Amino acid sequence: MTKLAAILKDGQRYMKAWPKEAVLSSMFPESRVIFATSLAIKTMPAIAVATVTLPFIGHQDELLPQAMMMATVLFFMPLQGLYWLGSRANENLPPSLANWYRDMHQKLSAAGESVPKVSTRPRYFDLASVLRQAFERFDKGFVLDQEN
């Protein structure tokens, strides 16, 4: 259970670390997953409660077992997004993205930004941190230009 809790916690950290830039939406699924997960975190508990409450209001007690099951599914739906984000955060970057990570890290270092030591096996969380810092420091064109 502690491994699951750690993955969910990593998912929360990754959700906060990922830059909310529209230009990244076409390159990475993270923006869409983060949007869906944050929406699910806000809405699904209320929908789950309503799912259980409605059979009581309508005096349809025979629907209560189905309502309880549906509420359980709805209540745990945000955890699926957090689990995916946590797993993704700990994945190693493919070689092309690892090179892009190193380029961004080098650009930030050259610009005088304080960046953590470059990782030899960078993960998606490392990329998110560097991208967030790069988008705060540089304009979008400079960040996405891989030839500089």
Image (cartoon, rainbow, N blue to C red):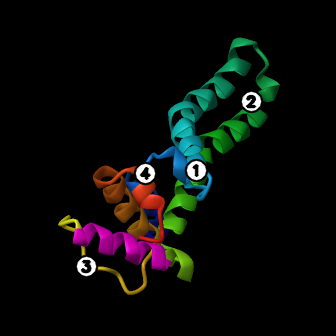
* Amino acid found under the numbered disc labelled 1: Ser
Which type of secondary structure does the marked residue at label 1 adopt? Answer: loop
Q: In this view, does 46 lie to the left or right of 111?
A: right
Please tell me which of labels 4 and 1 falls first in the chain. 1
Query: Element type at marker 4?
Result: helix
Q: Which of marks 3 and 2 is nearer the N terminus?
A: 2
Please identify the dominant SS of the magenta region.
helix
Residue 130, position in %: x, y?
35, 64
Of label 3 and label 1, which has the lower sequence position?
A: 1
Q: Which of 127 and 146 is in front in this view?
A: 146
The residue shown at (51%, 41%) is 38
Labels 3 and 1 touching (C-beta < 8 A): no
Instruction: Tell me how far mark 3 sits from mark 2, CA to CA.
Output: 55 Å
What label sits on residue 117 in the rendered view?
3
Q: Which of marks 3 and 2 is in front?
A: 3
Q: Which of marks 1 and 2 is nearer the N terminus?
A: 1
Element assignment for label 2 = helix
Q: In this view, does 123 lie above or below 31?
A: below
Does the magenta portion include 54?
no
Percent position of residue 36, x then y:
59, 42
Magenta span contains residue 108: yes
Disc 3 crowd rating (10 Å Cα; few below 14, some 14-19, many 20+) is few
Give the Cα distance between marks 1 and 2.
41 Å
Quarter residue 96 falls in: bottom right
The residue carrying mark 2 is 64
Residue tagged 4: 140
